[in-house]
Image (cartoon, rainbow, N blue to C red):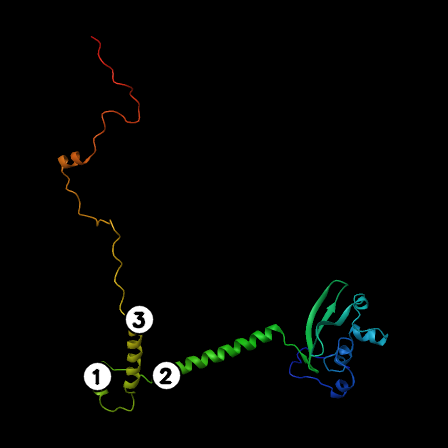
Amino acid sequence: MQPPGTDMTGICFRDKLWLNTYPLDRNLGFDYFALSPFYDWTCNNEQLRMRSIHPLDISQLSKMTWLEYMLSEVMEPQLLVFRKQKRDSAEKVTPMLAYYILDGSIYQAPQLCNVFAARVGRALYYISKAFTTAASKLEKIGYVDTENESETLEPNGGKEAIDFKEVKRVDHILASLLRKLGQAPPPPPFPDGFVPPTTEVEKDPENQQAAEPQPPALDPIIDHGPAKRMKF
């Protein structure tokens, strides 16, 4: 048989006869997965099955090199996740693809780059649709030709007239916002003891000398001792 292709996300597999006969658990789940077209018959797990060894025996798979399947996630009996990987040594493996069994149906998990591409494409579609809708709404308002204002009063099929209902609606929205916000609050008062700055002091030498403090006759920091009296 030919090995399965890389991209098989568009198909699923389900065998009702097998599901009605055997339980879907971690022991028999791989046998059910081997019936699907996602299974690669050249893998190491198939060699273990031919030798009557459990195909998910990690002690045997670690001794081999080539493609293999590992059971990565288990939520019996609803979900089983198998990871396809390439083993180069006992400790070195390279993940390739992932498959999961959900309620008896087998699917291939999409790659992360494809998921991102699909989500980005969907987001761009809705953004483009939103801009188109907004542009159609704005076109209904129309425009005023200031140069030929008198001509706009006459019916003209080439130019769109102003939609006064739309203008009134916008005015109503602005008025409602103004009522909700209210007037701007007054500035807060000055704190107690605050003296507003005055004008520049006149540069008068007499006033300047009077304003400057005079140094004391004695230094208050130095202790000069008791006053001395003259002896007669």
Position above or below: 131 against 70: below
Tag 2: amino acid? Lys
Choose mark 1 or mark 3, whichever is in front.
3
Q: Earlier in the sequence, mark 2 or mark 3?
A: 2
Decide which of tag 1 and tag 3 comes sooner along the chain: 1
Q: Residue at x 72, y 70 (%)?
A: 85
**In front of the other: 229 or 182:** 229
Q: Is residue 174 left or right of residue 33?
A: left
Q: Quadrant of the N terminus?
A: bottom right
- Few, some or many residues within 10 Å of mark 3 (<14, 14–19, 20+): few
Q: Quadrant of residue 138?
A: bottom left
Say which amino acid is labelled 3.
Leu
The image shows residue 170, relative to residue 62, as above or below, that is below
- Picture quarter with the C terminus: top left
Residue drawn at point x = 31 percent, y = 78 percent: 173
Q: Does dot 3 land on a helix, a strand or a loop? A: helix
| Residue indicated by mark 1 | 149
Residue 80 % position (x, y): 71, 76
Q: Which residue is mark 3?
A: 181
On residue 231, the disc is none
* Residue 3 on image: x %, y %: 74, 79
Number of other residues with Cα within 10 Å of mark 1, as a class: few under 14, some 14 to 19, many 20 or more: few
Q: Nearer the viewer, residue 13 or 232?
A: 232
Please tell me whether mark 2 or mark 3 is closer to you in this view.
3
Tag 1 near tag 2, CB within 8 Å: no
Per the image, the residue denoted by label 2 is: 137
